[in-house]
């Protein structure tokens, strides 16, 4: 794990966007396609605002969320809607979205199909992660009904997840899928999350601190 400490959030967001763009360009120099997994939520929005204008062959990039709530894009809590508004616009509008939500179905009905599509994109070229103060990442929540399976080295690429405190059922990439990334980044802000990361590093079991399963070769980007 490598910790990169920034003087302010604006600099962090711009630097991370530049790093991601460079990593995608490098991938496309020797691969037919590149794949990018990104978190939802409010924190990465400014990264997307900068990244969407990057000068690269977006038509050869598969973009997916690290996890999604099982709600339609018209719902205010849809991460996919945020992704379309903030990342899949400008030059990046040409990228291919790999959806984690399918309308008109339950998660259990389509999770195998979703997982197979994610598997086709592995190894990920770039994975960007977020983290909660409870040390969850993606929808790998402490207490999640399929957390143990999601942390397994034999896990499918994507799983359903129901967890205490999560308002809706989720679909999440597994630790195996996220750890496949050639370039892996965690973006966090504030002292509370930095303290949570330190706690995760000392945790004995990733079931209690799921981010612990992703710490290998992880670039941590932090600003107050």
Image (cartoon, helix red, strand yellow):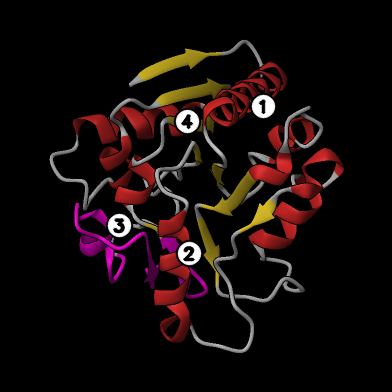
Q: Are marks 2 and 1 in contact (CB under 8 Å)?
A: no
Quarter of the rendering occupied by the N terminus: top left
Pointer 3 local density, CA inside 10 Å: few below 14, some 14–19, many at least 20: many
Q: CA distance from mark 3 to mark 4?
A: 21 Å
Which numbered marker is on residue 185? 4
Pointer 4 local density, CA inside 10 Å: few below 14, some 14–19, many at least 20: many
Residue 103, picture quadrant: bottom right
User: Which residue is drawn at the image coordinates 13% and 39% (left, top)?
Assistant: 204
Q: CA distance from mark 2 to mark 3?
A: 26 Å
Tell me if residue 156 is in the magenta stretch: yes
Q: Position of residue 67 (x, y in %)?
A: 50, 58
Q: Position of residue 113 (x, y in %)?
A: 45, 75
Q: Earlier in the sequence, mark 4 or mark 1?
A: 1
Q: Look at the image and tell me whether residue 165 can be seen.
A: no
Q: Look at the image and tell me whether residue 207 can be seen.
A: yes
At numbered mark 1, what does the secondary structure look like: helix, strand or loop?
helix
Residue 82, picture quadrant: bottom right
Q: Earlier in the sequence, mark 3 or mark 1?
A: 1
Please name the residue that numbered disc 2 is placed on: 117
User: Which residue is drawn at the image coordinates 74% and 61% (left, top)?
Assistant: 81
At numbered mark 2, what does the secondary structure look like: helix, strand or loop?
helix
- Which mark lies nearer to you, 3 or 4? 4
Please name the residue that numbered disc 3 is placed on: 142
Tell me if residue 40 is in the magenta stretch: no
Q: Which residues are magenta?
A: 144-172
Pointer 1 local density, CA inside 10 Å: few below 14, some 14–19, many at least 20: many
Q: CA distance from mark 4 to mark 2?
A: 22 Å
Which numbered marker is on residue 120? none
Whether residue 141 sits left or right of residue 32 in the image: it is: left
Please name the residue that numbered disc 1 is placed on: 17
User: Which residue is drawn at the image coordinates 67% and 61% (left, top)?
Assistant: 80
């Amino acid at each position: 794990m490598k910790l990169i400490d920034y003087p302010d959030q604006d600099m962090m967001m711009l630097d991370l966007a530049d790093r991601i763009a460079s990593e995608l360009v490098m991938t496309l120099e020797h691969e037919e396609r590149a794949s990018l997994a990104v978190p939802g939520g409010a924190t990465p929005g400014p990264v997307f605002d900068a990244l969407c204008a990057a000068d690269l062959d977006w038509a050869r990039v598969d973009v997916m969320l690290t996890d999604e709530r099982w709600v339609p894009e018209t719902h205010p809590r849809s991460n996919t809607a945020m992704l379309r508004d903030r990342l899949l616009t400008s030059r990046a509008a040409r990228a291919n979205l790999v959806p984690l939500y399918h309308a008109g179905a339950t998660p259990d009905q389509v999770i195998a199909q979703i997982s197979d599509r994610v598997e086709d994109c592995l190894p990920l070229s770039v994975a960007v992660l977020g983290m909660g103060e409870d040390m969850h990442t993606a929808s790998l929540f402490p207490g999640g009904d399929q957390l143990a399976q999601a942390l397994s080295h034999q896990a499918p690429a994507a799983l359903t997840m129901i967890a205490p405190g999560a308002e809706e059922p989720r679909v999440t990439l597994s630790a195996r899928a996220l750890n496949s990334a050639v370039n892996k980044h965690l973006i966090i802000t504030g002292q509370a999350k930095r303290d949570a990361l330190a706690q995760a590093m000392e945790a004995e079991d990733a079931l209690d601190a799921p981010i612990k399963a992703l710490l290998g070769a992880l670039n941590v980007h932090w600003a107050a």
